[in-house]
Image (cartoon, rainbow, N blue to C red):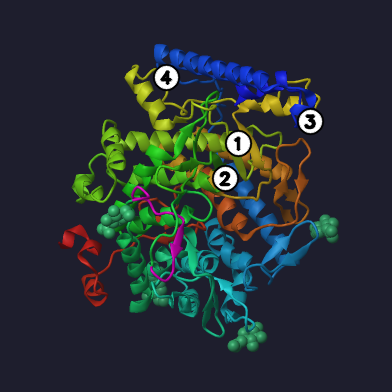
Amino acid sequence: MSVLSTVWGTFFPTNMPLSFHRRGISFRRILVVVTFSFVLCILYYSHSRRTQSATGFVPEEDVVIWPTEPPEIWAERAAQVKNAFLDAYHGYERYAFPHDELAPLSNASTNSFNRWGVTAVDSLDTMLLMGLKDEYERALPLIMNSNFSLPVNTAVPFFETVIRYLGGLLSAYALSNDSRLLTKADELGTKLSPAFNTESGFPVFGINTYEGVESGPPIGVLAEIASWQLEYSYLGKVTGKKEHVERAITITDLLNNANLTLSGGMYPTKWDLATGMPRDLHLSVGAAADSGHEYTLKQYLLTAQTDKENLEMYIRMTTHVINNLIFISPQRQLVYVTDMSTYKLEDTRVSHHFEHLSCFFPGLLALGVKMLPLDDLESLGIDVEELTRDLLPRDRRGYETLSEFSLADVHLWAAEAIAQTCYMTYADQPTGLGPEAVVMRAGGMFRTTLWMDAVRAWDRHGRQGSPPGVGDKLPWSEPPGLVSTRERDRATISRDYGVRNIAYYLRPEAVESFYMLWRVTGDVRWRYRGWHVFQAIEREAKTPSGYTCVDRVHMKVPVQLDLMPSYFLAETLKYLYLLFLDEDILPLDRWVFNTEAHPLPVFTWTPEELTTYGFAEEHLPSAML
Ligand SMILES: *[C@@H]1O[C@H](CO)[C@@H](O)[C@H](O)[C@H]1NC(C)=O
Ligand SMILES: *[C@@H]1O[C@H](CO)[C@@H](O)[C@H](O)[C@H]1NC(C)=O
Ligand SMILES: *[C@@H]1O[C@H](CO)[C@@H](O)[C@H](O)[C@H]1NC(C)=O
Ligand SMILES: *[C@@H]1O[C@H](CO)[C@@H](O)[C@H](O)[C@H]1NC(C)=O
């Protein structure tokens, strides 16, 4: 790409009109230029291949000096996050309560999530974890008095309502043991249930909780139709109501019965709500798909590792992602997970977009590394033959090549490398805040490198240095003295990505993964990365009445928008708090975070429940077989 555009620029200055003939450019001249460019490309390509094969893959590593501070410092930082939460919540209470969200510059409120006070409900468990009794007591009456009603002919989004409201209520119940919260959760879960009135049983997009009618398009996206089983199975467990449990089982069966041959064993993004079958071949762990993948592992963990179908799904998904969707950039060796679409068989296009939303994925991998015997899946009754039976030969080969490595190693390296890239997208910006989406430089026409290819090359040549993408990296900064936009754009080539969406929406995914990696590896670097992110939030996103989304994070002078999403209090500040808190108050083997960071306790079904709910054998704890 860069070679071609340079050649092009030399022969055809950009101000040249597009019609060749009027300027007297002959076909022969064009042919010469095209041939010349082609030869240059070949030379460039073969040269880079030669250097790579002669030296093997030697990962680039910067020397980063990490501070050596006394460990007591972290308790004080956790206290700073708690103060940030108080500032944010008090601003909401003062200017926006009982509406949904605070507009923290104009001191106004917005109502984009049902008008049931989403910030208060989403914040309940964070208050309990931080020991904020007064704020909690002040929020409770709003919840107790809510009837989850709506004006006629409107609808609430099923997915967002489940993860924010139902998840928030259930988590606050689990942490407080206040049965009134459970009653409200049961009421809400029941009022949302008309969403399941589709032919397949997948939930439709929206419901009117007053009229009990559902509405929405006939096609759903994975994240919205397949991430509510944690909430409904825990609700079923604690209420003892069969209908809630059955919904959670139905979704597992539906997903498990889908034909995933063409998507390599991974759930694609779009699904038909009538037939329950996939409707496209777009594979992604980012927007519209993310939590659908997240809930496979988490449903398995929440049910005390009894639900084997979800575990199998997790193994198939991660294997396909590792073999096909994780790439490494050419210069800085930034490892990223992206998405691809298959239009016709053999016409597959990789976007090389890397979304902030995808930054949850390294944390999920790390959680799997901690909780699963990845190198001894047979001990859990996982049979690779069976797992790959319906896959195409090329996808089955992916399992063979991966089996040359320790699966736990590969998952952890991928987690560390991608989470580091998430961090670099923050550290590279003058604001220290990470953009919503970047587009990675894939390395020119021929040189797109799958991360696993780099790992294999590194392995073949004696594993010098850290695995590709894992070693420390220094932030990128613009070379000094550049004036024109063009010069500055060119300079970003050495950064290996362009910023595609320049806003930071106070999202949690990066610090969520730092938290998971800190708990799983005990490596203090994750705490420092999180600390840098928190300092940037304090510096750039704080307003007199709260915290706001920020635009133009890639400029020295960013622009504050006027919105404080409820997930900032439910997720971003919660994960930062837990990251700095020394005490492990939510051990990962006893609590599972829903996709809105609401922790739910791991539970087991009693023998009576298993009989009552008619569980299939796959759902039985192995001890009961
Ligand atoms: C919003 O409230 C804060 C804190 O009370 C105050 O400092 C600020 O001036 C207010 N902004 C507007 C636009 O009223
Ligand atoms: C629900 O509560 C709202 C506000 O408190 C009230 O206006 C409405 O009449 C109630 N609806 C029902 C069905 O009770
Ligand atoms: C929770 O509350 C119930 C009564 O609502 C009580 O029976 C139970 O012992 C409590 N559990 C805990 C752990 O406090
Ligand atoms: C699944 O789909 C593939 C490709 O369309 C097809 O060849 C295969 O027979 C299907 N498998 C089942 C079990 O229906």
Residue at numbered disc 1:
425
Residue at numbered disc 4:
57
Mark positioned earlier in the residue sequence (2 or 4): 4
Mark pair 4, 3: CA separation:
44 Å
The numbered mark at residue 17 is: 3
The image shows residue 614 at horizontal and vertical percentages of 24, 74
| Magenta segment | 262-275
Q: Quadrant of residue 363?
A: top left
- From the image, state whether disc 4 or disc 3 is nearer to you: 3
For the C terminus, which image quadrant?
Answer: bottom left
Ligand 2 resides in the quarter of the picture at bottom right
Instruction: Using the image as rendered, state which of residue 76 and residue 235 is in the foreground.
Output: 235
Q: Is residue 67 left or right of residue 183?
A: right
Q: Secondary structure at mark 3?
A: loop
Q: Within 8 Å: ligand 1 and the Cβ of disc 2? A: no
- From the image, state whether disc 3 or disc 1 is nearer to you: 3
Mark pair 4, 1: CA separation:
24 Å
Residue at numbered disc 2:
356
Mark pair 1, 2: CA separation:
9 Å
Residues at marks 1 and 2 touching, judged by CB atoms closer than 8 Å? yes
Q: Amino acid at mark 3?
A: Pro
Q: Amino acid at mark 4?
A: Phe
